[in-house]
Amino acid sequence: MSVALNAIQRVIDLLEEKRDYFALYEQASLEMLSCELDGLEEKLEHRAVMIAGIDCLDEQIDEACDKQELYCQAARAACGRGELPDEWKPVFDRAMQVRAIVSRLPDIDLQIEMRLEQERDLAMEQIKSNNRGQNAQAAKYYGAMVGGTAPRPGRFGSA
C-alpha cells in the first residue's frame, strides 16, 4: 500500500472515530432533554470530554492530510465530491456522515437551552413562593425577635 493510500485510510479511520464522538455527544445532548435535573451537570461534562476528543481528532486529520487544502476540505466535506481524486471520495463520504450528525446539533442545543430556561424559571418561582409563604413571614418575625431588633412599625407608627 502506498504512502498516499495509508494517509487516506488514516483520515478515514480518524473520521469514523470523529463520527463516533459526535454520536456520543448527540446522545448526551438528547439525554439532557429528559434527564433529572441532577443529571444535567454530568451530561454537560460528558459533552465537554467529547468536544476535547473531537478537537484532538481534527488536529490529527489536518496532519494526516499533510495540510494540503483540497484534502483538508475533503475531510471536512467543504468541497464538491466531484473535485476530488477517486481515492479521496471515501474520505468525503465519511466527512458527510460527520456533517449529518453535526447538522442536527443546533436544534438539540436550542431545545436544551429552552429546558434550562424553563428549569431556571421554575426555580425562581419556587424561591418567590417560599419567600411569600407563612413560614417565611414567621422566620422574619422570629429573626427580629431573637436578633433583638423589633419589627418596624407600620406606616403610621405606634400609637
Image (cartoon, rainbow, N blue to C red):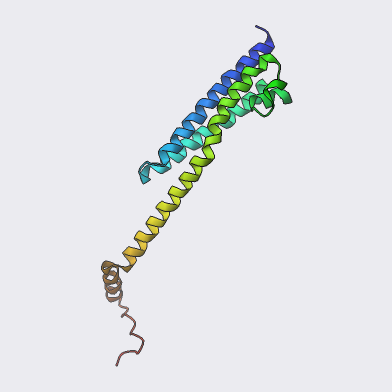
Q: Position of residue 38 (x, y in %)?
A: 36, 44
Q: Residue at x 53, y 23 (%)?
A: 17
> Across the whole image, how many numbered discs are drawn on residues?
0
Of residues 26 and 97, the one nearer the viewer is 97
Q: Residue at x 68, y 8 (%)?
A: 2
Left or right of 50 in this view: 64: right
| Quadrant position of residue 136 | bottom left
Q: Please identify the residue farthest to the front as the structure is shown.
A: 82
Of residues 52 and 80, the one nearer the viewer is 80
Please state, as top left, top right, bottom left or bottom right, where the N terminus lies in the image.
Answer: top right
46 in relation to 143, above or below: above
Q: Is residue 48 visible?
A: yes
Q: Position of residue 4 (x, y in %)?
A: 69, 13
137 in relation to 155, above or below: above
Q: Please identify the residue farthest to the bottom as the structure is shown.
A: 159
Q: Residue at x 34, y 89 (%)?
A: 157
Q: Position of residue 27 (x, y in %)?
A: 44, 33
Please state, as top left, top right, bottom left or bottom right, where the C terminus lies in the image.
Answer: bottom left
Left or right of 63 in this view: 122: left
Q: Please identify the residue farthest to the top as the structure is shown.
A: 1
Of residues 55 and 76, the one nearer the viewer is 76
| Quadrant position of residue 28 | top left
125 in relation to 91, above or below: below
Left or right of 23 in this view: 80: right
Q: Position of residue 143 (x, y in %)?
A: 30, 72
Q: Is residue 66 visible?
A: no
